[in-house]
Image (spheres, rainbow, N blue to C red):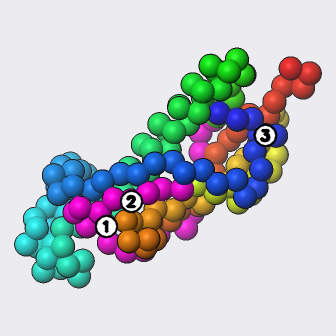
Amino acid sequence: MRFFEDIEIGHRREIGAYNFTADSIKAFAAKFDPQRFHLDEEEGKNSLFGGLAASGWHVGSACMSLLVADGQRLAREAASRGEQIAVWGPSPGFRDLRWIRPVLAGDTVAYANVVIDKRSSASRPGWGILTARTTGTNQRGEEVYAITASAFVPMRVQGG
């Protein structure tokens, strides 16, 4: 991963895509969001969603999994080039979580992340706070998911 100074506002990163199968929707729902329209095709069809719908938490969890996997891939690539790896800190939170359209069985959602703000942390010297907007778009080009989240990002050691 990159250091705070190396990240530019406006930088866009495609982080991957996830296919929401009926089986994956039901398995996630059974464990974490057992509502009828997430568990049964007929109930989903008869709901406002018009089909078996993924839990919004499933859509967000798939995004997080892809975000972490992409970060690990970028870190491996940087390490193979002999670059120093920035180990990011936790997230101080998120805002503006939106489930814009239903994600139905058979949909594939592609996620992208755009840096929208960065600032030095007032309370943690040596750290910056990066804010990014992550969106998910289905195979029809419709935005289905959006979130604005922040993360602590280490600053490059001076003279290093």
Q: Which residues are magenta?
A: 89-112
Q: Nearer the viewer, residue 111 or 121?
A: 111
Mark 3 lies on residue: 6
Q: Quadrant of residue 65?
A: top left
Helix, strand or loop status at disc 1: loop
The label number, if any, that marks residue 113 in the structure image? none
Type of residue at label 2?
A: Val
Q: Nearer the viewer, residue 70 or 65?
A: 70
In the image: residue 21, left or right of residue 8: left
Q: Residue, x 16% and y 52% (percent of image)?
A: 23
**x, y percent for residue 4:** 77, 40
Mark 1 lies on residue: 103
Mark 2 lies on residue: 109
The first of marks 3 and 2 along the sequence is: 3
Q: Residues within 10 Å of mark 3 (few under 14, many from 20)?
A: few
Q: In this view, which residue lies farthest toward the left?
A: 42
Q: Residue, x 29% and y 63% (percent of image)?
A: 107
The first of marks 1 and 2 along the sequence is: 1
- Pointer 1 with pointer 2, Cβ within 8 A: yes
Type of residue at label 1?
A: Val
Q: Residue, x 86% and y 20% (percent of image)?
A: 160
